[in-house]
Image (tube, rainbow, N blue to C red):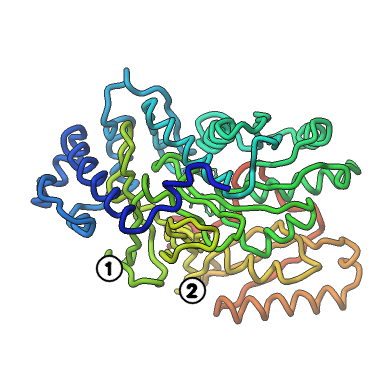
Amino acid sequence: MFFQKDLETMRRSDLEALQLTRLKHFVQYCYDNVAFYHKRMDEAKFDPAKLQTLSDIQYIPYTTKEDIRDNYPTGLFACPMKDIVRLHASSGTTGKPTVVGYTRRDLDIWSDCVARLVTAAGATDEDIVQISFGYGLFTGALGLHYGLEKIGATVIPISSGNTDKQVMMMNDLGVTALVSTPSYALYMSEAAREKGVLDQLKLRLGLFGSEGCTPAMRDQIEKSFHIFATDNYGMSELCGPGVSGECELRCGMHINEDHFYPELINPNTLERAALGEVGELVVTTLTKEGFPMLRYRTKDLTTIDYEPCKCGRTFARMAKPMGRSDDMLKIRGVNVFPTQIESVLMTEPHIGGHYQLVVRREGYMDTLEVKVELTDGSLLENYGSLEALQRKVQSDLKSVLGIQAKVNLCEPKSIERFQGKAKRIVDLRGEGDI
Ligand code: DLL
């Protein structure tokens, strides 16, 4: 099923022609309407009128999160506020939030992009969809909301929190599709089991996103809820959800390339990554009017596959991000991604999907403690089995990560639950001693 079949199945040569036309217009638009971009291009001696090919984009400087912060709150907007019809903002865990603005046309394109992804995932106008992302400044809830309304689905804007009520509504209203972070979905499935309603639910589809989730973790959520789930990716700076998402074949997330021009770079050298190599995703928003982003460094590490998909879509597919270059933990000189740890934990049937990584500095040494819940608390009474499981996980982690980690097997429900993005990392190394 397609939402905009002609666009989603375009021949690559036609797509590139469209991208080039849009890019030429977009770069000139940024130059003419955003003082920051004007100055950056002048400094790089880049004349927008001379852009001839898609690869000429390489001569335009990157834009970073710091650039957005330096122009807080609206210095990178390309329109007067009277043309902006909506503002959103990122959570801003460090410092000021990133404020993003949308014109009416931006909102329309955004909901088209989301409508494509949810259709590709199998959602239809027959679905009753519970949106359990937090409504408000976060882009996730309203982004999915308008995309799902556009395809004619019945939307329940319940927002996040009050998990018992979520389960009740899901059951009483015959909800067929759930929008949430994967970690919250797992939490809701536990709550539904406790209430004894899990097997009565009509849920068939999970539309997850906004945080990393290994295939094994997704498998666990699918089994416990008896659903099929897809992943979708985006970020506030680029619009929110709607940048890319999986089709029913789940072999990568299709990037809406007619609106988002992707590049992959080596985050250290800033050179273009070779085809098939892991790199940092850099995105240019080809059609954004309110808050245009030119070569934005997302910090997300992924690969891109340009082969057309068996589903008929020709848009390139990005792999699930393996992590963010700034989320990567450096422990005793070794790069560690939470997704690597999750993939080890999920192979153990006695271990559940809730875990936390605690990093400390002891003397001059960094230590990593992996706290993870057991699925069955009675194992805690069987010291022999517990110790064997702990040794096995420690050894598997050592071979995947290359460093020793202490594994702490905890009682079920002892690790904090999250209703939005899960906070898996607790880094207790003081700023001063890093
Ligand atoms: O999380 C937008 C979104 C909402 C996407 C709902 C999908 C669904 P931010 O809060 O700005 O925006 O966070 C963006 O979250 O740079 C990634 O590091 C991470 N992220 C988003 N989607 C995924 C995903 C929204 N599917 C940051 N897998 C991004 C892994 C993801 N990481």
- On residue 332, the disc is 2
Q: CA distance from mark 1 to mark 2?
A: 23 Å
For the point 43% across and 59% down, the residue is 316
Amino acid type of the residue that numbered disc 1 sits on in the rendered structure: Thr
Asked if one can make out residue 335 in the rendered structure from this viewpoint, the answer is yes
Indicate the secondary structure of the residue bearing disc 1. Answer: loop
Above/below status of 171 relative to 266? above
Quadrant where the image shows the C terminus: bottom left
Give the mark nearer the N terminus: 1 vs 2.
1
Specify the amino acid type for callout 2. Answer: Arg
| Mark 1 crowdedness (10 Å alpha carbons): few <14, some 14-19, many ≥20 | few
> In screen coordinates, is 16 left or right of 386?
left
| Residue 248 on image: x %, y % | 61, 55
Q: Position of residue 372 (x, y in %)?
A: 72, 62
Residue bearing the label numbered 1:
269
The residue under the point 39% across, 25% down is 104
Q: Is residue 377 left or right of residue 32?
A: right
